Image (cartoon, rainbow, N blue to C red):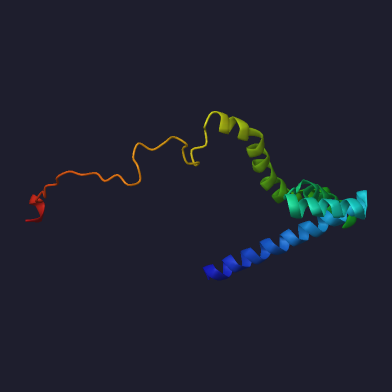
Amino acid sequence: MKILMLLGGMIFFVMFTIFQFVLGYLGIQHHLGAGLAIIALILLLFFKFTLPFTIGSFFGAVNVLGLHWVFGLLIMIPGIALLVPGALLVFFNPVINKYNLNRFKPSSRPSPFDDGDVIEGTATVVEDDLKK
């Protein structure tokens, strides 16, 4: 049952994405012409710049399909929800790199140990009194 729900969710997501891109193309073509719609498609495919298609999906839903502006906004929200965090990361990336705030990036500090170092020492076996 979980697999069917997961598969259904994936199919819905792919279909919604295709629907949003078609609406984006139609919205841009309706307002700015086919040439700029193709340029926006090139920006989307080669540079992953989705803002024109996100805005175009709103205008495609409202002006081309004739939906109410609330439904156009609901169609546009997933694109904005994914665009805003990426834009914030690009905006604050110089600050993160300047002050070394990125905790997930490996440190550039040299390691005090070489790759071939072996730690030598003696070990003693300690008997556990609780197991007896």
- Estimate the x, y position of residue 113 in percent, counting from the top left: 34, 40
Q: Residue at x 10, y 55 (%)?
A: 131
**Towards the viewer: 67 or 39:** 39
Q: Is residue 28 left or right of residue 49?
A: right
Quarter of the image where the C terminus is located: bottom left
Residue in front for this viewpoint, 28 or 114: 114
Instruction: Give the residue drawn at x 75%, y 55%.
Output: 45
Q: Position of residue 56 (x, y in %)?
A: 83, 50
How far across and how far down the image is residue 6, in percent? 57, 65
Q: Is residue 8 above or below residue 71?
A: below
Residue lying farthest to the front in this orientation: 116
Image point 44% across, 34% down: which residue? 109
Marker count (numbered): 0
Residue 10, by quadrant, is bottom right
Q: Is residue 93 above or below residue 2?
A: above
Q: Is residue 82 visible?
A: yes
Residue 107 or residue 62, whichever sits in front: 107
Residue 75 visible to an observer of this rendering? no
In the rendered structure, the answer to whether residue 61 lies left or right of residue 3 reads right
Seen at 24% across and 44% down, the residue is: 119
